Image (cartoon, rainbow, N blue to C red):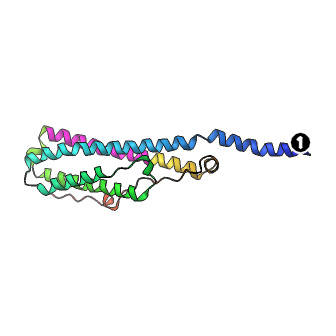
Amino acid sequence: MKKIFILVILAIVAPLIYLIVSNYNNIPKLDENVKEKWSQVQNQYKRRADLIPNLVETVKGYAQHEKSTFIEVTEARSKVSAINISADTLNNPAVMQQFSNAQAGLSSALSKLMLVVEKYPELKANENFMALQSQLEGTENRITVARKDFIEAVKLYNLELRTMPGKLVAAIAHPDATIKETFTASPTEQETPKVKF
């Protein structure tokens, strides 16, 4: 009788131990993947912020009386630079929303700057401006790809925490693991851009 009891216990405990051991590293690996993808998003936002002063200075040379637009772009860039999001604050929806709003404000200001450019045909033909505009466009595309990769990484991490066996392993081995917030576009970013010529 004792042997049967021991065999039954082993039959239950052994698969559980195997399950935990074989899946133990999934959550930390997925968590690090989310952090890496978020770093890429920040990297692309930083690249955009670094390009903006050069773009503004190039446009300023042609359109000196468009001061309010330049001020708006500069202030939007400052707001973006002031918000610091690390991998540790990814689970804070308020900070993520603040960061998203600042990025949306910068995107809006850049759109206005591009409208100013439309008024100056000789600027559009300027080699420096064209190179900067091309780099900025490439950066916007990189931001989109980095956001997509981040969203996918968060999805995989959250799925691991919400489905079996990851849910069980998380409850036993990683009780501090929590669902992560994904990237969301602000209402401003979802509006159709208004272009006037």
Q: Say which quadrant the C terminus sits in.
A: bottom left
Q: Give the residue pinned by disc 1.
A: 3
6 versus 101 height, above or below? above
In the image, farthest residue toward the right: 1
**In the image: residue 132, left or right of residue 158:** left
Residue found at x 35% / y 55%: 100
Report how many numbered discs are placed on residues in the image: 1
Q: State the extent of the magenta-drawn residues as a range.
A: 128-150
Q: x, y percentage for residue 23?
A: 62, 41
Q: x, y percentage for residue 107?
A: 26, 53
Name the element at disc 1. helix
34 versus 181 height, above or below? above
**In the image: residue 145, left or right of residue 34:** left
Residue 121 visible to the viewer = no
Q: x, y percentage for residue 39?
A: 39, 43
Quarter where residue 194 is shown:
bottom left
State yes or no: residue 182 in magenta.
Answer: no
**In the image: residue 167, left or right of residue 181:** right
Residue found at x 86% / y 46%: 5
69 versus 31 height, above or below? below
Q: x, y percentage for residue 49?
A: 26, 46
Residue 80 visible to the viewer = yes
